[in-house]
RNA sequence: CGGGGCGUGGCGCAGCUUGGAAGCGCGCCUGCUUUGGGAGCAGGAGGUCGCCGGUUCAAGUCCGGCCGCCCCGACCA
C-alpha cells in the first residue's frame, strides 16, 4: 500500500476524552473515530486490525470443528419471550418497534436465535454434535460505556454455541473451544489467565473467563500467590478462620447508640474495631425475608447470596420492610429477636467470633457481647463475603489472594438444556426418545481484543502490534522521495516484500523524515525498513523491530530475509 | 441513576473570577526554502463560544433550564 494513496489520518494530540492508552493511541493512530458515547467508526487501519484478529479467531474456530454462520441483529420479541429473558435480561437490550408496532431487540447475544435455528435443523443424534459460530455486531444498552473500545454500546463479538447429545459430548465440545481460545490468545500474544466466573444472565455452569491483567480493566480477579487458584472477584472465595466453640451463657448487654447506623459510626462510638461487629443485612427473597450476617469489616457478595436462594427474586428490603421486621429504623437491625420466619444465614467467618456487637432491633440501640447459640441461632452457614486482597486462599490454605485489575476478553459456559428445552431444540436418540440437546456457549470480545492488544503492546511513541494483528506486516520509509536512486531501491524492496506475501505500507510521501518516523511509531507495524542516508552512503537499509527497537543493517540482497526474520519474532 | 469534571475554528487549550472588538499552539491552503525524529519564513482561510431562555445599553463571561462528552460509583454477558 502506498502511503500517499492510503487513508492515514494521525493526530498529533489525542482528543481530551481519551484517557487510557488504547483509546488514545487508536484515536491518534487513525484506527477509530468516535461517533457517540460508546460508539465508534473503524477507519481503514482499524478495520485491517479487526479483520486480522477475526481471521485468527476464524482459523482456530474452523480447526476446532466449528462452522461459521451469520445470524440477524434484529430479534423478534416472541423469541425472547420463549426463553423467558425478554423481561429479565440485564442490562436491558436495546429495543425497537417496526411501523406495524412489532417489537424487537437488537441482539445482545444469540442463544435464542441459534437455538431456534438448530431446533429446525438438528433432528437426530446423528446430526450432533455441532458447533456454530458467528462474528457479529452486538448491542447492549450499557449504563456507562468506558475506555474507548473496552466497553461499547455496539461492539463486535465472536459467539459460538455447541449442541451435544450428552454431558460427555458437552465436555468434549467445551474443551475444544477452550483449547481453541488458548491458541487464539497465544497467537495474538495476549498472556491471558483463566478464572472462575459468574454465569450472570446467560446461566450455566463450569464457566471460565479469559482475562488479561491490566490496570485499565474494569474487572478484578483474585489469584493465589502459591497455588493455581484464580477467580473473578464476583465469586472468589477465601478461607474462613476455624470455628470456635460458642459460649454457653448469654452476656448480652443493651447499649444506647443514638443515631449511629453505620459500621463506622458504631465502632467509633463503642471504641471497637469493625471485625468485632456483625453486620445484619435484610433481603426480600421470593415471598420471605432473609437476614444475612457478615463480619463488620466485610462486604456481602450479592452473587453468592443470589446463588444461595437459587431462582428466587432477590432484593434488599426497603425501609418500610426493615421497620416492620425489626421495629426500628434502618441501621439498627440485628439477629437477636427477629421474627421467627426470617431465615438467618451467616457467613462462615461469623462462626469464629465471640462477644460481638450487633444491632438491637430497636431505635438508637445496639447489643454488645452477643454470642452465637446463647443469643440467637443461625439457620444456615454460607460463604457470603467478598474475598479481599490478602485473604488466605481457600484452595491451598497457605497462599494469600492477590487482587489484580483485568480486562475480560472471553467467557465460556456450559449451558445445559436451559435454552434447548425452552425453544424445543430436541433430537431423537438411538432408542427414539426425544431429548433436548445439551448446549455450551463461548464468546470472545473481538473489538475489545483490539483495545487489549494496544493496552498490552504499546510504548511511549505508539502501538507495537504483534505479528498476527498488525494492520501491515512491515512499513518502508523512503526518506528522500526525490532521490531517484533511493526511490528505485525502495520501490524494488516494496515489490519483493509483497512477492513474499507481506502486506507492506510504503511511505513514499513527500513529507519530512520526522513525520514519517513519528507516524510509523504511532501506527506500530512490526517491522520498519528505512531507505535513506545509510542506503546512499553504505548501500544498506535499516531494519528495525518495533516491539523492542532491535535494529540491524542489511544489504539490499539480505533485506527481504531480514524483514521476514524480524517479523517472525514479533 | 448518584458524585465529579468538561463543552470556545479539525485537534489541544487560554479568555469567564471583575460583562465592553474572540485569542494562542498544532493542523489546513498558497509561495519559497528544507529532507534522519511530528521542518523554517512569509501570506491566507476557517469560530451561531453546545442549545434555549433570562438579566443588561452591552453576555464566551452573570442567572435558569436542557443537551452532549469524559472520569468514579452502582450495574455488567
Image (tube, grey):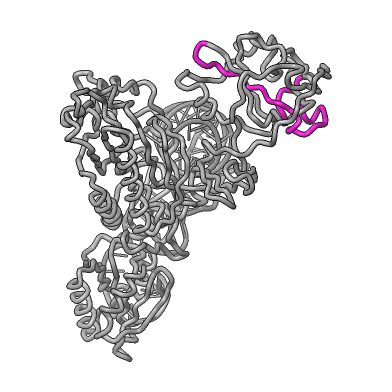
What count of labels does the image hold? 0
Which image quarter holds the N terminus of chain A? Answer: bottom left
* A427 up-or-down from A161: above or below: above
* A252 up-or-down from A165: above or below: above
**Could you tell me residue A483's position as x and y percent?**
24, 84
* A106 up-or-down from A56: above or below: above
Which image quarter holds the C terminus of chain A? Answer: bottom left
Q: Residue at x 46, y 64 (%)?
A: A459
- The quadrant holding residue B3 is top right
Residue range in magenta is: A259-287
Q: Is residue A504 shown in magenta?
A: no
User: Is residue A264 something one can see in this rendering?
Assistant: no
Q: Residue furthest bottom?
A: A537
Between A375 and A154, the residue placed more toward the observer is A375
**Could you tell me residue A421's position as x and y percent?**
29, 23
Between B43 and A520, the residue placed more toward the observer is A520
**Could you tell me residue B42's position as x and y percent?**
38, 71
Position of A556 compared to B72: left or right?
left
Q: Residue furthest front?
A: A431
* A172 up-or-down from A166: above or below: below
Q: Residue at x 24, y 40 (%)?
A: A131
Q: Residue at x 47, y 22 (%)?
A: A310
**Could you tell me residue A159's position as x and y percent?**
30, 41
User: Is residue A49 something one can see in this rendering?
Assistant: yes
Q: Residue at x 28, y 74 (%)?
A: A564
Amino acid at each position: 500500500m502506498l502511503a500517499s494513496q492510503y487513508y492515514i489520518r494521525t493526530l498529533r494530540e489525542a482528543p481530551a476524552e481519551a484517557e487510557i492508552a488504547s483509546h488514545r493511541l487508536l484515536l491518534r493512530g487513525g484506527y477509530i473515530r468516535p461517533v457517540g458515547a460508546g460508539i465508534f467508526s473503524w477507519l481503514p487501519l482499524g478495520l485491517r486490525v479487526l479483520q486480522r484478529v477475526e481471521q485468527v479467531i476464524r482459523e482456530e474456530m474452523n480447526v476446532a470443528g466449528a462452522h461459521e454462520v451469520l445470524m440477524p441483529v434484529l430479534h423478534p420479541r416472541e423469541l425472547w419471550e420463549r426463553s423467558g429473558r425478554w423481561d429479565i435480561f440485564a442490562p436491558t437490550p436495546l429495543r425497537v418497534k417496526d411501523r406495524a408496532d412489532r417489537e424487537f431487540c437488537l441482539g445482545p447475544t444469540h442463544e435464542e436465535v441459534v437455538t431456534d435455528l438448530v431446533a429446525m435443523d438438528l433432528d437426530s443424534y446423528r446430526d450432533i454434535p455441532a458447533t456454530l459460530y458467528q462474528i457479529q455486531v452486538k448491542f447492549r444498552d450499557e449504563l456507562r460505556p468506558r475506555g474507548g473500545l473496552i466497553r461499547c454500546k455496539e461492539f463486535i463479538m465472536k459467539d459460538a454455541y455447541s449442541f451435544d447429545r450428552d454431558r460427555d459430548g458437552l465436555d468434549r465440545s467445551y474443551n475444544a473451544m477452550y483449547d481453541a481460545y488458548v491458541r487464539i490468545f497465544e497467537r495474538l500474544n495476549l498472556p491471558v489467565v483463566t478464572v472462575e466466573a459468574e454465569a450472570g444472565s446467560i446461566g450455566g455452569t463450569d464457566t471460565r473467563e479469559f482475562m488479561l491483567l491490566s490496570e485499565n480493566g474494569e474487572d478484578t480477579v483474585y489469584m493465589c500467590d502459591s497455588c493455581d487458584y484464580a477467580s473473578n472477584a464476583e465469586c472468589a472465595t477465601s478461607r474462613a478462620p476455624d470455628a470456635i466453640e460458642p459460649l454457653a451463657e448469654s452476656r448480652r448487654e443493651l447499649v444506647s447508640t443514638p443515631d449511629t447506623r453505620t459500621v463506622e459510626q458504631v465502632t467509633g462510638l463503642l471504641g471497637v474495631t469493625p471485625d468485632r461487629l456483625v453486620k445484619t443485612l435484610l433481603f426480600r427473597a421470593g415471598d420471605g425475608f432473609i437476614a444475612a450476617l457478615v463480619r463488620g469489616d466485610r462486604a456481602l457478595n450479592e452473587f453468592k447470596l443470589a446463588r444461595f436462594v437459587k431462582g428466587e427474586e432477590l432484593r434488599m428490603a426497603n425501609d418500610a420492610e426493615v421497620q416492620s421486621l425489626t421495629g426500628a429504623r434502618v441501621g439498627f437491625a440485628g439477629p437477636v429477636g427477629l421474627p421467627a420466619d426470617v431465615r438467618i444465614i451467616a457467613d462462615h467467618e461469623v462462626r469464629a467470633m465471640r462477644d460481638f456487637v450487633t444491632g438491637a432491633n430497636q431505635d438508637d440501640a445496639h447489643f454488645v457481647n452477643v454470642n452465637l447459640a446463647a443469643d440467637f441461632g443461625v439457620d444456615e452457614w454460607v460463604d457470603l463475603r467478598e474475598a479481599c486482597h490478602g485473604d488466605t486462599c481457600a484452595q491451598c490454605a497457605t497462599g494469600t489472594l492477590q487482587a489484580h485489575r483485568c480486562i475480560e476478553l472471553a467467557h465460556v459456559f456450559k449451558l445445559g438444556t436451559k435454552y434447548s428445552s425452552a425453544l424445543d431444540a430436541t433430537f431423537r436418540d438411538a432408542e427414539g426418545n426425544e431429548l433436548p440437546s445439551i448446549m455450551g456457549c463461548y464468546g470472545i470480545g473481538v473489538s475489545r481484543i483490539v483495545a487489549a492488544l494496544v493496552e498490552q503492546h504499546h510504548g511511549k511513541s505508539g502501538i507495537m502490534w504483534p505479528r498476527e494483528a498488525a494492520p501491515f506486516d512491515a512499513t518502508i520509509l523512503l526518506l528522500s522521495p526525490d532521490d531517484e536512486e533511493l526511490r528505485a531501491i525502495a520501490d524494488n524492496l516494496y515489490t519483493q516484500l509483497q512477492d513474499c506475501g507481506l502486506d507492506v505500507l510504503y511511505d513514499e510521501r513527500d513529507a519530512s523524515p520526522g513525520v514519517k518516523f513519528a507516524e510509523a511509531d504511532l501506527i506500530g507495524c512490526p517491522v520498519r525498513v528505512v531507505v535513506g542516508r545509510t542506503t546512499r552512503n553504505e548501500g544498506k537499509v535499516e531494519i528495525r523491530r518495533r516491539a523492542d527497537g532491535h535494529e540491524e543493517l542489511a544489504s539490499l540482497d539480505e533485506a527481504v530475509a531480514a524483514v521476514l526474520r524480524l517479523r517472525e519474532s514479533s
